[in-house]
Image (cartoon, grey):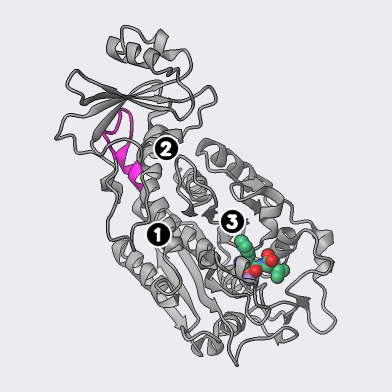
Amino acid sequence: MIDLAIANTRSRPTPVWVLGPGDTARSKGKLPASCVAWAKANGFDGQKGKILPVPDEKGNISAVLFGSGKDALPFDLGGITGNIPAGNYTLEGNFGDPHLAALGWLLGAYRFDRYKSKSPVMAKLVLPAGVESSTLRREAEATFLARDLINIPANDMGPDELEAAMRNLGKIHKASVKVTKGDKLLNANFPMIHAVGRASNNAPRLIDLKWGMKDKPLVTLVGKGVIFDSGGLNIKPGNSMVLMKKDMGGAANVLALAGMIMDAKLPVRLRLLIPAVENAISANAFRPSDVLQSRKGITVEIGNTDAEGRLVLGDALALADEEKPDLLIDVATLTGAARVALGPDLPPYYTDDDKLAAEINKASAAKFDPLWRMPLWAPYQKTLSSKVADVNNISSGGFAGSITAALFLSRFVEQAKSWAHLDIYGWVPSSKPWAPVGGEAQGIRALYDVIEKRYSK
Ligand code: BES
Ligand code: MN
Ligand code: ZN
């Protein structure tokens, strides 16, 4: 897929001139006179997103003008890839940071074509000078992997296929992968993963990947792998259920992030934990009012079977925590409330570690990978109280749903030196120049940067 968007320069590339308002006039001398005249004749003055192919005397395209507008975003160039003829292109003019421009191009060239009988042919970029292609490929490939895993529907991306994706990643990077599946989850003490996933024909499981050297700092990633969330007996209405193939978006993202870490051979010991389950409905489904045991020993009253993500994560986080990781990060499409608070493009994250938060904020800004800190507001813990068990899986009152979900998770983390939780949407609801509608990677370029900076010294 990436190779479909990076050119191998054998055929002569066409220049794409990136120009803002006024740049056409200012670039005289550099920009061919034919381009200046054609721009003028067509009213092109660097308007944001505007694409103007410039013909030569024979009617072939000699150049393409691309408007960056006055408030250009780093990945805007992604909008060009599907809108110019297939072929090889170079970048000229004011395209800003070459790495970000090239990344925008690649990200915008992604199409989910697995089920299409014809694949679109995309315009290819000759990488501009100053771009480190290994870093670029790593970022783009991780994003494409996360998008693919999310976009593939649950009938082709169940617990088996998620396990296969993880085994495949393990094989590429020589990591070990261990799977605890079906009723073995009970013997191994993962009662909540079992309870959530047992009503499905596709057995629930915990997938555990380990990589790296023993003496290095331990980084553990945990991802919500609910391959489809029907809501369980508290069934979702149709319009809320239709997108729920994306409920393994957290798993897709940590899997992609783990790929980046191993590909770059960062000097860490990595553990990746994915509880892969389907929240299905059957005679043996868990019910509202059931009380579940948990790995941690906390008993959990089920207020709502649709708050299933926090249950499978609770057991996975408890296991992760037993090893006292230096850094523990979980990523999950955990609540609708996160979207009410911040919208689909700005995932909230939670941590009690101010130093880690500062690192995440810095990386998020540098990598243009939006994340926003929200508080683990301890006074709301009491809204999770239960009359019959240690805790309820939903909060009373219905306020601050993303915060109370994070607080629920916090009960399963005690010993990790540092913990952060990301409540992502994992989906692009309306297309952007650098992302078509569909599954999306969120936070992984920022998190990679944090991990690299923390441990590469
Ligand atoms: N997977 C959903 C959360 C979700 C819904 C994420 C829509 C993104 C878009 C989660 O399992 C869920 O159903 N959460 C409930 C929790 C509630 C029952 C306390 C929610 O957010 O409504
Ligand atoms: Mn749910
Ligand atoms: Zn869910």
The magenta-colored residue range is 123-138
First in sequence, mark 3 or 2: give its number. 2
Q: Is residue 137 magenta?
A: yes
- The amino acid type, in three-letter code, at marker 2 is Gly
Q: Which residue is mark 2?
A: 79
> Looking at the picture, does residue 364 appear above or below residue 95?
below
Decide which of 175, 81 is in the foreground and name it.
81
Q: Quadrant of ligand 1?
A: bottom right
Q: Percent from the top left, x then y, of residue 411?
A: 71, 69
Q: What amino acid is at disc 1? A: Asp
Q: Is mark 3 within 8 Å of ligand 1?
A: no
Badge 1, how many Cα within 10 Å: few under 14, some, many 20+? many
In the rendered structure, the answer to whether residue 13 lies left or right of residue 154 reads left
Dot in front, 3 or 2: 2
Task: Determine contact: label 1, label 2, CB under 8 Å.
Answer: no
Q: Quadrant of residue 152?
A: bottom left
Query: Label 2 neighbourhood size at 10 Å, few (<14), some (14-19), many (20+)?
Result: many
Q: Residue 148 bears which disc, if any?
A: 1
Residue in the image at 66% along x and 74% along y = 306
Which is more N-terminal, label 3 or label 1? 1
Q: Pointer 3: residues within 10 angstroms few (<14), some, or many (20+)?
A: many
Q: Nearer the viewer, residue 420 or 69?
A: 69
- Callout 1: SS: helix
Q: Nearer the viewer, mark 1 or mark 2?
A: 2
Tags 1 and 3 in contact by the CB under 8 Å rule? no
Of residues 443 and 22, the one drawn nearer to the viewer in this rendering: 22
Q: Secondary structure at mark 2?
A: helix
Q: Which residue is mark 3?
A: 424
Q: Is residue 5 above or below residue 207?
A: above
Q: Is mark 2 within 8 Å of ligand 1?
A: no
- SS for dot 3: loop
